[in-house]
């Protein structure tokens, strides 16, 4: 899954004479250099992506949005019509929120106002230097990574991933520090969600950090999702346990179970047609399957799709020739819940007896584990 957080450059506290109630919000926006009549677009994020919620015209470089938002706090974005270099993220909640949009360099935009946005801005200031170096590295090596992926040069792919991971680890240290120091900040819940999505923090540490969050933060939408992950840590679908059996319809409508799909080695692959990282990883999984299928590797793909046509289209387009099933229930999929899956792609590697021996391996690590198990 991609990072939600764009790094901003500086902290801004704007003065405003707006009068608002306890259950209302006002967004005071500045967008200098943007012509009159252009729209400022408020966008919110749900499980399906970023969706527009409200718009307002910019006049004399200013815009204002007012209302009540009982669903907050949550991550949201301001996008300016005609400005195509990104969106400004902020914490959407009741209260006075101040945003200065830099139309030329969106990462230099500024947010402030509510305590959550002040803390978000401070975090962005601290992580900005690392983020800039990471983006520069990614831009410089993007084509090299694409070419290596297409040609199957996994040595180069893994080397680039490892180099990029150095920057991410620096960011992660600062994120952990922020969570430790700010148990009452909504951003702490967002950062924990991000750790879960990237599977980059020991689940026990996620649990420990979650337990330090204030009750109010735990009760937010993001806090509840982290809480569900923590509860799922007690799931039977853990390394060393036998994989729980399940069944669901395949693309032809026939019910298929895990038990009948077991090979000498079995990979349970949670994915979806709408999941970009899943689709990007599919060529590597196809290569792995083609190399080891005859030796006893089987894969069962569990899709979190809702649209049967898009699911089947993705299977055909990506040439995924192994077993596929789906309940077409998106994140309400009972198998995903049974296995405690909070983000995709997610994989479980089973031995011949059906015991879970590894989770969420990629690339060279996955290939090495499959080869090791097949050699037994």
Image (cartoon, rainbow, N blue to C red):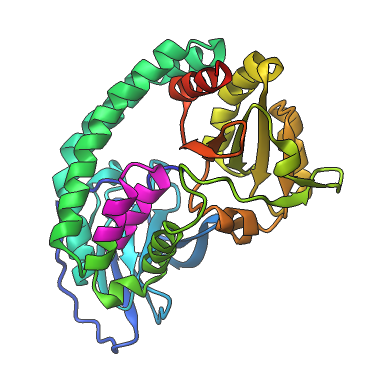
Quadrant in which the C terminus appears: top right
At x 17% / y 46%, what residue is drawn? 174
Q: Position of residue 202 (x, y in %)?
A: 31, 46
Foreground pick, 349 / 283: 349
Please provide percent x and percent y for residue 262. 69, 35
The residue located at (41%, 81%) in the rendering is 70
| Magenta highlight on residue 240 | no
Q: Is residue 108 above or below residue 54?
A: above
* Magenta highlight range: 187-208
Residue located at (47% from left, 47% from top): 238
Q: Picture quarter containing residue 227? A: bottom left
Magenta segment, principal secondary structure?
helix
74 sits left or right of 252 in the view: left
Q: Is residue 234 visible?
A: yes
Q: Which image quarter: residue 281?
A: top right
Q: Residue at x 66, y 44 (%)?
A: 302
Q: How many marks?
A: 0
Q: Is residue 341 above or below residue 169?
A: below
Observer able to see residue 61: no
Q: Is residue 181 above or below residue 177?
A: below
Of residues 25 and 184, the one nearer the viewer is 184
Q: Quadrant of residue 133?
A: top left
Q: Position of residue 366 (x, y in %)?
A: 49, 25
Q: Is residue 207 magenta?
A: yes
């Amino acid at each position: 899954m991609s990072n939600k957080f764009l790094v901003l450059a500086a902290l801004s506290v704007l003065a405003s004479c707006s009068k608002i109630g306890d259950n209302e919000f006002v967004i005071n926006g500045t967008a200098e250099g943007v012509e009159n009549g252009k729209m400022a677009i408020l966008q919110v994020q749900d499980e399906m992506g970023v969706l527009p919620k409200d718009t307002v015209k910019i006049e004399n470089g200013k815009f204002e949005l007012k209302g009540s938002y009982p669903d907050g706090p949550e991550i949201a974005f301001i996008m300016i019509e005609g400005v195509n270099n990104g969106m400004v993220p902020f914490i959407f909640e009741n209260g006075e929120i101040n945003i200065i949009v830099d139309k030329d360099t969106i990462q230099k935009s500024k947010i402030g106002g509510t305590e959550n946005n002040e803390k978000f801005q401070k975090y962005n200031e601290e992580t900005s230097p690392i983020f800039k170096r990471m983006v520069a590295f990614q831009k410089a090596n993007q084509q090299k990574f694409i070419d290596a992926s297409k040609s199957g040069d996994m040595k180069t792919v893994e080397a680039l991933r490892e180099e990029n991971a150095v920057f991410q680890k620096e960011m992660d240290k600062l994120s952990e520090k922020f969570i430790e120091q700010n148990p009452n900040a909504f951003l702490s819940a967002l950062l924990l969600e991000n750790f879960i999505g990237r599977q980059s923090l020991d689940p026990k540490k996620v649990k420990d950090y979650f337990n330090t969050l204030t009750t109010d933060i735990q009760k937010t939408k993001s806090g509840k999702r982290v809480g569900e992950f923590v509860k799922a840590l007690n799931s039977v679908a853990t390394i060393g346990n036998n994989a729980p059996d399940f069944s669901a319809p395949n693309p032809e409508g026939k019910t298929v179970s895990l038990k009948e799909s077991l090979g000498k080695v079995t990979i349970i692959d949670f994915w979806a047609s709408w999941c970009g990282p899943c689709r990007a990883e599919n060529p590597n999984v196809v290569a792995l399957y083609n190399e080891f299928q005859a030796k006893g590797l089987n894969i069962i793909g569990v899709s979190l799709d809702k649209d049967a046509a898009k699911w089947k289209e993705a299977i055909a387009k990506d040439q995924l020739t192994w077993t596929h099933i789906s309940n077409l229930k998106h994140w309400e999929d009972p198998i995903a819940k049974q296995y405690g899956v909070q983000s995709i792609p997610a994989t479980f590697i089973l031995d011949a007896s059906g015991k879970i021996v590894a989770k969420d391996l990629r690339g060279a690590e996955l290939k090495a584990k499959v080869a090791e198990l097949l050699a037994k």
